[in-house]
Amino acid sequence: RGREGGGEAVTTAREVAQRIVSGRGLPEETAGRGRAPANIALVKYWGKRDEELNLPVTGSLSISLGPLGSEVEVSPAEGPHDAIWLNSAPQPLTGVFARRASAYLDLFRPAPGYWYEVKARNTVPTAAGFASSASGFAAMARALDDLYGWGLSIRELSVLARLGSGSAARSLQDGFVEWHAGSAPDGMDSYGERLPAEWPELRMGAVVLCAAEKPVGSREGMKRSVETCEFYREWPGRVAADLAALKDAIARKDMAALGTVTEGNALAMHALMAATRPPIVYALPETVAAMRTVWAARQEGLPLWFTMDAGPNVKLLFEAKDEARVRGLFPEVQVVAPFG
Ligand code: PMV
């Protein structure tokens, strides 16, 4: 798979970034700002065809979380290293957050020894169970675009955001966003695109069951699934069918169809994870209990579905008219209206 096969020219993330921004000079402003929404996949991304460029094996489709996401301010700094802040706290250079941010900034340094100051703020409530790395890298790409005055398109920004974290490709726009897998070795055709659909009644609820650090990160987990799960070969076909069914459900605003595809796709991804060697199981007893609560409520006529990512927390999908009943079942739920 990917860069070992085929004898294609190896493209690095920095080469891709520089191809997009080259010749556009040094900062125009003293600081650039960007913001981006977090997103939750309804049809999941699990598996890369290229580790360096975060190119996915399949497409995926998400919903953006409106005001919940990240804000980033970036400016040139004195050095002799980057200065990285998260929610007003200076981040240790050896910590995971600063190292990931600096590695991303490496793609954009005009020269070695050129430093940045980054002030990142997450507008996702702390430990809400909504991932912030996607919105963080998308906001960072926007902030750099603002700093340098590149004037990049959404599509170019999506490609740049993807180089930080795959799912960030879907965080440049609101609403439903499809990330096209693409087929080009340099990934220029692998970007997020908004679907022309509105669904104001749609709600997403986060149920936090455990705020602890996940045992296996998504990068490591998906690599392991691609390499060792014998069912992985079934996954691309399943995703293609789910994407078609989901787009149809969105076009018809069919909540039952959207819920059925979303829940089934998440469970299929978690089945892949469980069949990976060594196995990856993110669910806790509380996760399974929440799933059973959803199924029992559905049996009694409540149109409620769930999805899960690389962690034990559950996200609920329902419509505004059912919010009171959902809150009755999950008093701790944090509800988001993706369409405002
Ligand atoms: O972009 P990453 O490396 O954070 O991977 C995201 C993986 C999932 O959240 C499990 C699925 C998805 O499509 O967001």
Image (cartoon, rainbow, N blue to C red):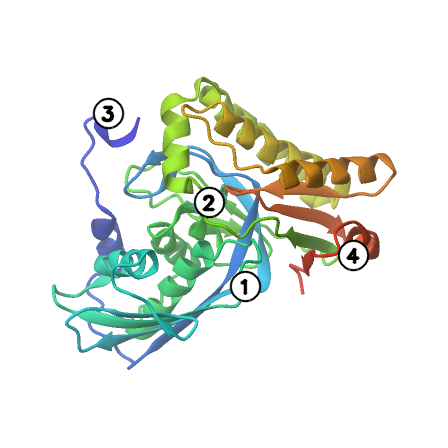
Q: Are marks 4 and 2 in contact (CB under 8 Å)?
A: no
Q: Which residue is mark 2?
A: 214
Q: Quadrant of the C terminus?
A: bottom right
Instruction: Work out how far the residue at label 2 is from the one at label 3, CA to CA, in angstroms.
Output: 32 Å
Say which residue appears at 35% left-offset and 72% top-offset: 146
Above or below, 60 against 120 in this view is above
For marks 1 and 4, the one nearer the N-term is 1
Q: Which residue is mark 4?
A: 320
Q: Residue furthest right?
A: 300
Q: Nearer the viewer, mark 4 or mark 3?
A: 4
Looking at the image, can residue 170 be seen?
yes
Amino acid on which the number 3 mark rests in the picture: Gly
Amino acid on which the number 4 mark rests in the picture: Ala
Q: Position of residue 258 (x, y in %)?
A: 70, 40
Amino acid on which the number 1 mark rests in the picture: Val
Instruction: Work out how far the residue at label 4 is from the one at label 2, CA to CA, in angstroms.
Output: 31 Å
Q: Which residue is mark 1?
A: 124
Instruction: Work out how far the residue at label 1 is from the one at label 4, CA to CA, in angstroms.
Output: 21 Å
Quick check: 59 left or right of 1? right
For marks 1 and 2, the one nearer the N-term is 1
